[in-house]
Image (spheres, grey):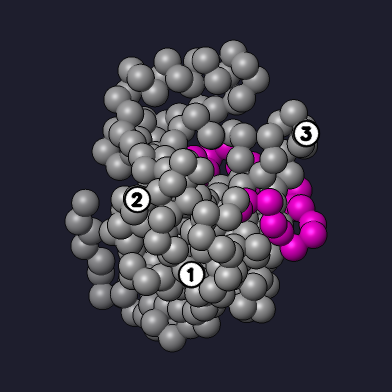
Amino acid sequence: MNYVMSQGRLRTMLPALLSILMTGTTLVAQEGGTQQRRLVEIRTEMGNMVVALFNETPQHRDNFLKLAKELYYDSTLFHRVIPGFMVQGGDPNSRHARSGEMLGTGGPGYTIPAEIVPTLHHFKGMLAAARQSDQVNPDRRSSGSQFYIVQGRTYQPDELKMMAQRMNAMGQKVDYTPEDIQRYAKDGGAPHLDGAYTVFGEVVEGLDVLDKIAAVPCDQHDRPLTDVHMWMRVLE
């Protein structure tokens, strides 16, 4: 969709646009003004991604920024990769892990209260917090460090509506706008996770890198046969 901006409006927005270039943030239009989103670069052997963190999930945002600044994620692995679904990382035990070693249980020693926002869905490229299952974690608290990035698949409108009806019947409350339905049909994602896991960011650069990681050969435990490391840098 194309927009035409008046010269007066452009002069008004110029300071904010310069702020984006100088501080490494994105601006999100909100009622009464704009709000910055913090950016984090995730570097891998297969290329780089940049994620923007949602202000609607402040505890997850701040925790992710803290760990990235502390280099907590550096040299850890994307230890679980399921094509057509997601890529997962953030286990500190994956740093220097032996080939074939089972991973996915490590963390910083704390969890984060759920911040499940009904309007933040699992579209392709969304960044979300891993967690233990409802059976042992009824409050749906998030892992203190493990996260996943959604690849998913596309869903036709009728298919998505039927899925939403089933989830709502089971108490997993979801509600899709026409724009949400169109996005799942066009870009894809993992809607079966909506309303159950905290989505706290999205990939704004490097979706092709996500697809490359999701395509790597894996063993029977979904661990890539060739390690895919990550290093993070807060853009500021």
Q: What residue is pinned by disc 3?
A: 136
**Label 1 is placed on what type of residue?**
Met
Q: Main secondary structure of the magenta part?
A: loop
Count of marks, rendered view: 3
24 in the magenta segment? no
Let me know if residue 118 is in the magenta part: yes
Image side of residue 17 versus residue 137, left or right: left
Mark number, residue 217: 2
Local crowd size for mark 1, using a 10 Å CA cut-off: few (<14), some (14–19), many (≥20): many
What's the residue at 62%, 16% (across, down)? 170
The mark that comes first in sequence, 1 or 2, is 2
Place of residue 118 in the rendered image (x, y in percent of width and height, measured from the top left): 58, 37
Alpha carbon separation for disc pair 2 and 3: 31 Å
Q: Which is closer to the viewer, label 2 or label 3?
A: 2
Q: In the visual, does 210 lie left or right of 106?
A: left
Q: What mark, if any, has residue 230 been given in the picture?
A: 1
Task: Quote the CA–CA distance across marks 1 and 3.
Answer: 29 Å
Residue at (66% x, 44% y) in the render: 131
The kind of residue on which mark 3 rests is Val
Q: Which mark is residue 124?
A: none
Magenta segment range? 103-121
Answer above or below: position of 84 versus 56: above
Disc 2 or 3, which lies upstream in sequence? 3
Looking at the image, can residue 86 be seen? no
Q: Amino acid at mark 2?
A: Pro
Q: Is residue 88 above or below residue 167?
A: below
Q: Are marks 1 and 2 in contact (CB under 8 Å)?
A: no
Residue 176's x, y, as percent?
45, 29
